[in-house]
Amino acid sequence: QKEVEQDPGPLSVPEGAIVSLNCTYSNSAFQYFMWYRQYSRKGPELLMYTYSSGNKEDGRFTAQVDKSSKYISLFIRDSQPSDSATYLCAMSAGSSASKIIFGSGTRLSIRP
Amino acid sequence: DGGITQSPKYLFRKEGQNVTLSCEQNLNHDAMYWYRQDPGQGLRLIYYSQIVNDFQKGDIAEGYSVSREKKESFPLTVTSAQKNPTAFYLCASRPGLTNEKLFFGSGTQLSVL
């Protein structure tokens, strides 16, 4: 079993819809949770960064962490065609020896 | 403009050849990383370096080598021992071990001729 599981999609939604992207994980030591957006053949770009449980909002994006369920989500409101990309979740335990573990990514397509 | 520069953008390798991918950063970050990305498999860690003149193997280090002679530079060599080198290679850096934010370069696509 992988430490981080992410549905690869593809996920296709109409413009303006609310998008929900999710990851589950098995390591209860994870404390730092990140979402990256990657356009085709480009480097990933950090979108959201959260520590421990709770919600964090930044513009149209909301990151949610539920450590009791080992489940994280990224919500995109008022989705735009420019949001079409692959979204990668990532997480780490935060100690100096810890690695950052990535999900396999979800391909998202926003239809105009 | 601060950032991470990877070159070349595209690289082709012949059978039995070693090739080197360049990664330079001017962010003054201590830690640098190399990831390999294959379709549908996310990012897999090849090597990482926390300080100059020190580096550690990641999950898939076989067939690769690195050096860290300068803080700004972390080149990756794909050796002839790597039998399946075709992939998208990403270099990343992070400010320090207490900061989990990774910053990525734009990637190098390596293909076998």
Image (spheres, coloured by chain):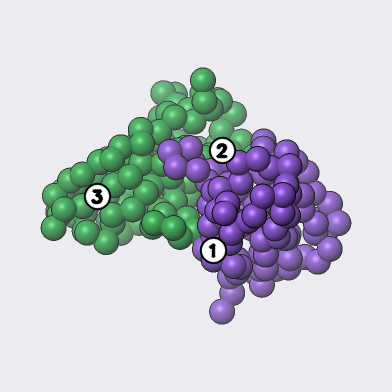
Chain colours: A green, B purple
Q: Quadrant of residue A24?
A: top left
Q: Chain of mark 1?
A: B
Q: Residues within 10 Å of mark 2 (few under 14, many from 20)?
A: many
Which SS class for mark 3? strand
Q: Residues within 10 Å of mark 3 (few under 14, many from 20)?
A: many
Q: Does label 3 lie on the same chain as label 2?
A: yes
- In front of the other: label 2 or label 1? 1
Residue A101 tag number: 2
* Amino acid at dot 1: Tyr
Residue topped by disc 1: B10
Which SS class for mark 1? strand
Q: Residue at x 30, y 37 (%)?
A: A9
Q: Residue at x 28, y 56 (%)?
A: A83
- Say which label, 2 or 3, has the lower sequence index: 2
- In front of the other: label 2 or label 3? 3
State how far apart marks 1 and 3 are (Cα). 26 Å
* Amino acid at dot 2: Ile
Q: B33 or A41, which lies in front? A: A41
Which SS class for mark 2? strand
Q: Residue at x 38, y 47 (%)?
A: A87
Residue B33 locus on image (x, y percent): 66, 52
Please determine whether, in this image, residue A2 is positioned above or below residue B27. Answer: above
Q: Chain of mark 3?
A: A
Please determine whether, in this image, residue B4 is positioned above or below residue A107. Answer: below
Q: A102 or A20, which lies in front? A: A102
Residue B83 tag number: none
Q: Does label 1 lie on the same chain as label 2?
A: no
Q: Does label 3 lie on the same chain as label 1?
A: no
Relative to B96, is A42 on the left or the right? left
Residue topped by disc 3: A109
Residue A7 locus on image (x, y percent): 35, 33
